[in-house]
Amino acid sequence: MDLVKDADTAANVLRTMWTIRLFEEAVDDLFARGLMHGTMHLSIGQEAVPVGTCLALRDGDYITSTHRGHGHCIAKGARLDAMMAELLAKETGYCRGRGGSMHIADVATGNLGANGIVAGGVPIAAGAALAVALRGGSEVVVSFFGDGAMNEGAWHEGVNLAAIWDLPVVFVCENNQYGMSMAASRAAKVERLSERAAAYGIPGVTVDGNDPQAVHDAVTDAVHLARAGQGPSLVEAVTYRWKGHSKSDKNLYRTRAEIESWREADPIARFEGACVLSEEDIAECRATARNAVREAVRVAHEAPDASASSLLAAVYA
């Protein structure tokens, strides 16, 4: 699929990237004004990875997400109003206001859930893929995670199980350069994290994570292998988060010059400059995304607050 030259596809890509960007900017603003509580992890600057990845999937495929998962949810087709309601602790949220930013799940679109545990989605993805294999299905599972997750035991266990059982999983590493404040270059000896795939006997590739076409092409190849019964692959998408790790991050471990250099590689601006869309088309994509986010904020604000009276309804014992 050519994301740049086909006008309809390009508009879809750009609209979705702008929706992710503007949704997170709205969330950032609501938090700053004291209208949203808890914490959150923004993926501003990483929009090309979930968009390029999810365009390689088809209806019925699954994803597992991370604590930095708003973009994954949106790219997989989540409703903005239900997402915003969840973050605002409203009864109409995806998890009735109980999960918040780090625990949104939308099984209807194949999103098996964001996860506050680093690498927690990796064994879940392997389990979902095992279920697909046992029932003879053709679905594929994509597991998103950050560079920091690749040093967690659960990551190695999940990838190894998927490899030895040839499970239909695509492991997508959003290498945004830092696991909290630890630079990825200091956390691993290998130059490219995709090199670790060799230890499990699966394909591994590193791509420009700020180019949705590069991400899409790599994930499409990996999905094809998985769907054909040839097992998992690892795709490392090199990108950058413009904001801190979370709302409490003082950004003492990186320089303004470094952040600014990555902002110049803005995936949205790059795509706008490369795609076939006219200035009017581009403006329309931005406006559509902006209006959708504003409507989501309005609807979520008007929704009833989550009720504590039913908190035990989902407890098994």
Image: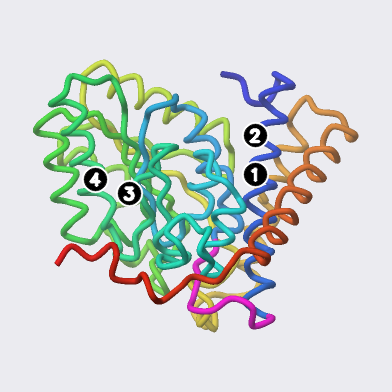
Disc 2 + disc 1, Cβ < 8 Å: yes
The C terminus: image quadrant? bottom left
Residue 243 position by quadrant: bottom right
Q: Is residue 45 above or below residue 249?
A: above
Q: Residues within 10 Å of mark 4 (few under 14, many from 20)?
A: some
User: Could you tell me residue 153's position as x and y percent?
Assistant: 16, 59
Distance from disc 3 to disc 1, alpha carbons, whole Å, reads: 25 Å
Distance from disc 3 to disc 2, alpha carbons, whole Å, reads: 27 Å
Q: Residues within 10 Å of mark 2 (few under 14, many from 20)?
A: many
Mark in the foreground, 3 or 2:
2
Residue 260 position by quadrant: bottom right
Distance from disc 4 to disc 3, alpha carbons, whole Å, reads: 6 Å
In the rendered picture of this protein, how many numbered marks are placed on residues? 4
Disc 2 + disc 4, Cβ < 8 Å: no
Residue with the mark numbered 1: 17
**Residue placed furthest toward the front:** 309
Magenta-tinted stretch: 33-42
Disc 4 + disc 3, Cβ < 8 Å: yes
Secondary structure at badge 1 equals: helix
Secondary structure at badge 4 equals: helix
The N terminus: image quadrant? top right
